[in-house]
Amino acid sequence: MIQVIATDRAGQVHRLQAPVGTLLMEVLRDADLGVEAVCGGCCACATCHVYIAGPQMKLLTAERGQLESALVGSTDVFREFESRLSCQVELRPSLDKLVLQIAPEE
Ligand code: FES
């Protein structure tokens, strides 16, 4: 298990326990933090959009793919250096204490 520190849209901070190997989206959705994940993780809805601060972005094992970039980049709340779709982030031990903020709804 690793810990994920998530700030919800109301500004409340949640410390979540998350199994290694799961998707970040699943952890946020299951914690009921307003991440709808409408498409179920198919990289087709952007309702799992989160912000991950710059230094922590470097810890992610994979950068944004083409599809993810196109989808999240088309949102009004896109941030070039912080935006990720949480369904595209698999949790690894190196991501323990990952800090993120759930992006505003579109
Ligand atoms: S859950 Fe739909 S894009 Fe991530």
Image (cartoon, rainbow, N blue to C red):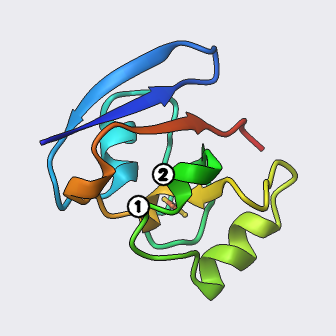
Q: Is mark 1 within 8 Å of ligand 1?
A: yes
Q: Is mark 2 within 8 Å of ligand 1?
A: yes
Residue 104 appears in the picture as rendered = yes
Q: Position of residue 75 (x, y in %)?
A: 81, 58
Most distant residue in the bottom direction: 66
Residue 103 appears left or right of 37: right
Residue at 16% from the left image edge and 54% from the top image edge: 20
Instruction: Find residue 91 and report its image quarter.
Output: bottom left
Q: Nearer the viewer, residue 54 or 45?
A: 54
Q: Amino acid at mark 1?
A: Gly
Q: Which residue is mark 2?
A: 37
Secondary structure under badge 2? loop
Q: Is residue 17 above or below residue 19?
A: above
Q: Position of residue 25 (x, y in %)?
A: 40, 51
Q: Is residue 88 above or below residue 48?
A: below
Q: Is residue 19 above or below residue 57?
A: above
Q: Position of residue 1 (x, y in %)?
A: 12, 42
Q: Amino acid at mark 2?
A: Ala
